[in-house]
Amino acid sequence: MDYFLTEEQSMIVEIAKQITDEQIIPNRAELDEKDEFPREILESMGQADLFGVPIPEEYGGFGGGCFDIVLALEQLGRGCIGVATAFAASSLGIYPIMISGSEEMKQKYLPDVAAGKHFAAFGLTEANAGSDASGIQTTAVLDGDEYVLNGTKQWITNGGEAQIYTVVAITDRSRGARGASMFVVEEGDPGFSCGPKEKKMGIRASSTTELIFKDCRIPKDRLIGRQGTGFITVMKTLDSSRPGIAALGLGIGQACIDEATTYAKQRVQFDKPIIGFQAIQHILADMAIQLEASRALVYASAKHIDAHPKDMSKVSSMCKVMATDMAMKVSTDAVQVMGGYGYMREYPVEKMMRDAKILQIYEGTNQVQRNVIGQELNKEYSRK
Amino acid sequence: MKIIVCIKQVPDAKDVRLDPETNTLAREGVQSIMNPYDQHAVEEAVSLKEQLGGEVTVLSMGPPQAEEVLKQAISCGADNAVLISDRAFAGADTWATSYTLAKAVQKIGKFDLILCGKQAIDGDTAQVGPGLAIQLEIPFVTCIQKIREANDTELVMERMMDDGYDVIAANYPVLLTVVKDINQPRVPSLKGKMKAKKVQIQVLSAEDVGADSTKIGLAGSPTQVVDVFPPPPRGERSLLTGTIDEQVEQLVKKLAAYI
């Protein structure tokens, strides 16, 4: 379907498509097999200005919005959401700075990320704080001109690879949600280290580690925004980033339809290509219907979010749920259409099916997204 | 460091076919691309500029639509683009093309280094690079697979040979032709694409470059193409199967039939 993209948007798609076709697709199986971080591909994305897409022009970026980043991520996701997750997590890591950081902080960190020289990471999740962010145990205590951080973050994408980490820590437990603050921690800060790489089911090209803070001392000007505003920044960050995860779902969905349809045209059983059988046609048709419907919602949501509406949380949750549930369904169906071949590692759809699962889990599980939508509906209708 | 890169727009080799009636290249509906070797030349020029400073000018001779490949080079980091385009250039062979490019290079002015792809994938002659150096009366080195060191006065490089490589040093000005091993061309950047959209490409005619009309186009070309034809279809073939012994037996029987 033609979404009448602007010339600039078409350029973003062209660049992301070229990197996907020339660099990601030929290497994705090996990166997956070896659990290898795609540093060269990410550098190539940096050189092509893709990291700069969501960053304002005054900090060396392209000044793009949610829709622009969605278009890039959809293409990258078509290749490998492991690679795309490493890319997306860097944007996620700098959203707190873009949303709540001071001018000095933006000047200091954003240009290097825009140029792809530095990667970023976002540290929220802990052993007892994932869907329930109020369970955060990591603390930050002001001591003279420094904050001292203690605690451990878990499952942090780009851990050990990023140079800049935006981290949530409790500065005043008595104030509940208003007692959390966000900080920038840099690679090499005293008392800060990353754990070993986690072994994952999918998105194995991305690096996932613990972030460990043991009396980690950072200058007090690394506080993002004001003390106690951490949760607000986190929520705004996730509202902005969720459509990007939805876009990865679109990418997987498209790749699965491409693979399954091509296969069904070639695979001959009972003397004809299996695409000639209604049983297969109906599976492919349902895959295409779900993908196009999801794409329409994701694109519409991203454009809506670019206008900074009040119902941003609800809309970004809706598109995340729909597109990522679609990705899980469509990738499972692609494996089914391809039968035994689909189940083999020699063909790409088994990886897509393994990869798709994380989309329903990270950046807020799809159950939590439904909670958000439900709570927003409750609020909306209470006002009427 | 002033670098000129000569590039050519060619039909995509994945899609080449002959018009069965005229036996000439069928260009209709065939996508045009930047000659792949030239993409490596552009990349090397941009890398050298990033390392040593200076500017990269891309130069192409061709019809107006060759602007597309010049814009592609701009999006990959080249600074300026010049197109030499004139109906009088039509039918030029490699000698007339070298002459015309040399006139354009003289018009562009001072340069330190000229980079070309080893050859174009349509003509496959590998003559235009060396021909241009001869016309400009500068040294040239072909088939460069690596530039080991580059500074403001000298280049040290590796020339690909059949059985290894030569290490060659050269002073400026010099012309190099490059092979694909030299680098991995970068993906165009967003800022590059924006720049390419706005760039004003300088278009020069035969008169603009001061070309002698007897030395350009078909009139200036010592090579005359007498005929172009597709290779004759191969005769009937069959594939022997089975074990090696069985295949040998089958082959002997087939050969015996000719005795």
Image (cartoon, grey):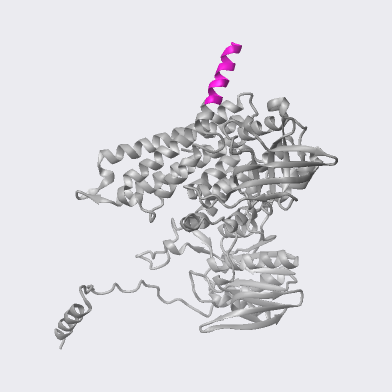
The percent coordinates of residue A71 (x first, y second) are 55, 42
Determine whether, in the image, residue B49 is placed left or right of residue A355.
right
Q: Name the residue: 40% across, 73% down.
A: B228
Above or below: residue A346 compared with residue A296: below
Residue at image position (60%, 63%) is B85
Q: Quadrant of the C terminus of chain A?
A: top right
Question: Outermost residue toward the bottom?
Answer: B259
Residue interval drawn in magenta? A371-384
Residue B162 versus residue A208 in the image, above or below? below
Tell me the quarter of the picture where residue B90 sits.
Answer: bottom right
In depth, the one of A161 and A71 nearer the eye is A161
Give the image location of residue A170, x and y in percent: 71, 34
Q: Is residue B188 visible?
A: no
Count of marks placed on residues: 0
Left or right: where does residue A29 sit relative to residue A304?
A: left
Q: Position of residue B213 (x, y in %)?
A: 62, 73
- Dominant SS of magenta comes to helix
Q: Could you tell whether B14 is left or right of B220 in the image? A: left
